Image (cartoon, rainbow, N blue to C red):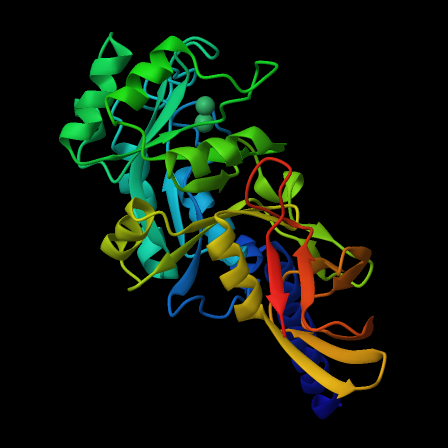
Amino acid sequence: MRRILLFCVAALIGSSALIAQNVNKIYVPELRTESRQEVVIPDVDGYEVLKGDFHLHTVFSDGDVWPTYRVQEAWRDGLDVIAITDHIEYLPHKKYVGGDFNTPYEIAKPSADKYGLMLVRGTEITRKQGVIGHFNALFVEDANLIPDDDPFVAIQNARKQNAFILFNHPGWAVDTCLVTEFQQRVFDADMIDGIEVVNHFEFYPRVVSWCIDKELPMFANSDEHGIISEDFRTFGHDSKIERFRPMTLVLVDERTQEGVKEALLEGRTIAYTDNMFMSTEHLLLSLFEACVDMETTSEGEKKNSYKYTNNSSFPFVISVNGSGKKVIPPFSTIHFSASNQKDLEITILNMWCYEDEHPVLIAE
Ligand SMILES: [Zn+2]
Ligand SMILES: [Zn+2]
C-alpha cells in the first residue's frame, strides 16, 4: 500500500512539471527569433554580398515597433546590415517616447551586437513630398545636430558629419517621378549619394535610369513601419520562402561599417524586390554569373544542349536567343537546347539596368 501511494505522488509531480514545461514552451516569445532564413548569394566579382535595409521606422517616429524588434526581424530574414531611420520632424508618439534622435540606435545597438547584425546610425529628414521630399542621412554621428527649419541646411548638417545622403521614394504619394527644384538644388550641391529605386511596395523604373545617368547607387528598402512579415516574406505551399523583403545588396571588401560605407560610395549595390534586381549592367551580369553555372553538355549538327545550375536563393528568368522564357529556380538545374548558333544570347528578364532594359549576356 505504501509503495503504491509513493508511486502516485511521484506520477503527479511528474505530470504537473510536464504541463508547466509545455505551457512555458508555447509562450516563450524568443522562439520567434531562433531561426534565421539564410539568403544565399555567392561572392560577386570577389566581393562578399551583404543584405541590407537602410530605411526602417520604430515607435520613436511613426512606426509601431520597438527598435530591438527591427533587429530581430532583420536577423530572422537573413539580413546583415540595417539602419533605423526615424523621422526627425514627424513624431506622433512624442507624448510617450522620443525627442532624442539618437535613442532608437542606442536601444537597438546591444541587440544588434548580440545577433551579429551591423547597425548603421541614421535618421530621415522629412519635408513636404512632391516639393522638398524625404532624405535619409546614414552613418551620422549625432542625429540631434541635424534638425533645422531649412531642409537644405538640415542636409548640410548631416553632410558635416560625413553622412551618406539617400534620396527616398521619389515616386511615393506623387503620380510620377520628377525632380523638383529643391531636389535639383541638392543634386547640384553634390549632396545626394544614392536613390531608392524601390520603397516598400513601389518600384520606380525611371529612377533606375536616373541612377545610371547620374552614376549613383540604387537602393531597395522596406521603409517598414509595422510588422515586416505581414507585408513581405511570401511563402509557397511547402512553407519555403518564394520571395524576400526588399533588400539592398552591398558588395563589400570587408564585413564592417567602413566596408559598407565604402561600397555604397563606390556604387557597389544591387537593389532587390519581388525577385527582381536593379543595378548597372556590369554588376547584374556579375551577379548572374556568380549564381549560375553555365555548361554546354553536347554539341550536335543543329542543336546544342545546355545545363544551367543556380546556386542561389533567387530564381532567374531568362530568354535564350530572343525566344521563350525559362525560369531557373533557386538551387536548381535546368537543361535546354538551342538551335545551332555560335554564341548564346541570354537576356535576363528579371533584371533591369535602365528603364525597360534588361542586361544581355553573350555565352559561349
Ligand atoms: Zn519617407
Ligand atoms: Zn521613411
- Judge left or right: residue 262 versus residue 12: left
- Give the side of residue 147 with respect to residue 54, left or right: left
Number of marks drawn:
0
State the residue at coordinates (36%, 17%): 183
Q: Nearer the viewer, residue 285 or 127?
A: 285
Give left or right: position of 229 versus 76.
right
Q: Inspect this view and state whether residue 147 appears.
A: no
Q: Where's residue 128, x and y in %?
A: 43, 9
Q: Position of residue 138 (x, y in %)?
A: 30, 37
- In the image, residue 25 sits, relative to residue 64, either above or below, namely below
Looking at the picture, does residue 142 appear above or below residue 358?
A: above
Q: Where is residue 350 in the image (x, y as percent from the top left)?
A: 67, 50
State whether residue 180 appears in this view: yes
- Residue 276, percent from left and from top: 63, 48
Question: Which residue occupies the foreground of this view, 65 or 321?
Answer: 321
* Nearest the eye: 361 or 6: 361
Residue found 73% across the figure and 65% down from its top: 329
Q: Which residue is drawn at 26% across and 51% down?
A: 262
Choose top left, top right, bottom left or bottom right for residue 341.
Answer: bottom right
Q: In which quarter of the image is ligand 1?
A: top left
Which quarter of the rendering shows the N terminus?
bottom right
Which residue occupies the foreground of this view, 244 or 68?
244
State whether residue 88 is above or below residue 349. Answer: above
- The quadrant in which the C terminus is found is bottom right
Q: In this view, does 195 lie above or below 229?
A: above
